[in-house]
Image (cartoon, grey):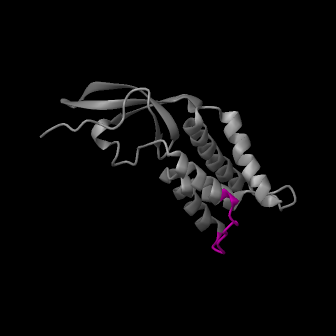
Amino acid sequence: MTKKKSEFRPNDYVVYPAHGVGQIMSIEEQEIAGITLELFVISFEKDKMTLRVPTHKATEIGMRSLSSPDVVSQAMKTLKGKAKVKRAMWSRRAQEYEQKINSGDLIAIAEVVRDLHRGDDQREQSYSERQLYEAALERLTREVAAVSGGDEVAAAKQVDDVLISRAA
């Protein structure tokens, strides 16, 4: 069996579905139950967390490279769209939003931000709506920042400007 070279390298920024943007610190070998595994050591600086992911499982679990600038502009277009709120019960919608956030798919995450965004003149959000909105917003902002070179404040402003222009 030939060992295929991974598309991920140390120092690369990657998106891990359940945690968002992280940086590969190193690739290490570790013996687990008598089997030597090659692992990506991924640091999620903001969450002060380190994950070790078996290299052969990375793609399977949905780890991916940062989105291309094209995907980022598509996500921004998505934000501009009209919120699509289903009439389903909140628990059902919340579940769908959570799945989208954890899918690691930037467009799906942008949909959650769009659908849960509230202008100043709109009704209050419930606590759980706000939690989901903030989680989605943070994922989106971090990836936009990582793609554009790492300025999270600028990325947050960019996302905010799109949301505000939409409300106007």
Mostly what secondary structure, the magenta segment? loop
State which quarter of the image contains the N terminus.
top left
Residue 93 to residue 132: above or below? below
- Residue depicted at x 57% and y 41%: 143
The count of marks equals 0
- Please state the horizontal and vertical placement of residue 115, each as a whole percent of the image: 68, 62
Relative image position of residue 127 (x, y in whole percent): 73, 53
Residue under the point 25% across and 35% down: 5
Residue at 58% in and 67% down: 92
* Range of magenta residues: 79-89
Question: Taking 81 as reference, is 144 left or right?
Answer: left
Residue 84 included in the magenta stretch of the image: yes
* Frontmost residue, 115 versus 155: 155
Image quadrant containing the C terminus:
bottom right
Image side of residue 77 versus residue 168, left or right: left
Q: Residue furthest left?
A: 1
Residue 3 visible in the displayed image: yes
Of residues 54 and 78, the one drawn nearer to the viewer in this rendering: 78
Of 11 and 30, the residue lying toward us: 11
Q: Position of residue 84 (x, y in %)?
A: 66, 69
Up/down of 97 relative to 35, above or below: below
Is 140 magenta? The answer is no
**What residue is at 60 percent from the left and 39 percent from the top?**
142
Residue lying furthest front in this view? 70
Residue 101 in sight here: no
**Quarter-wise, where is residue 145 in the image?**
top right
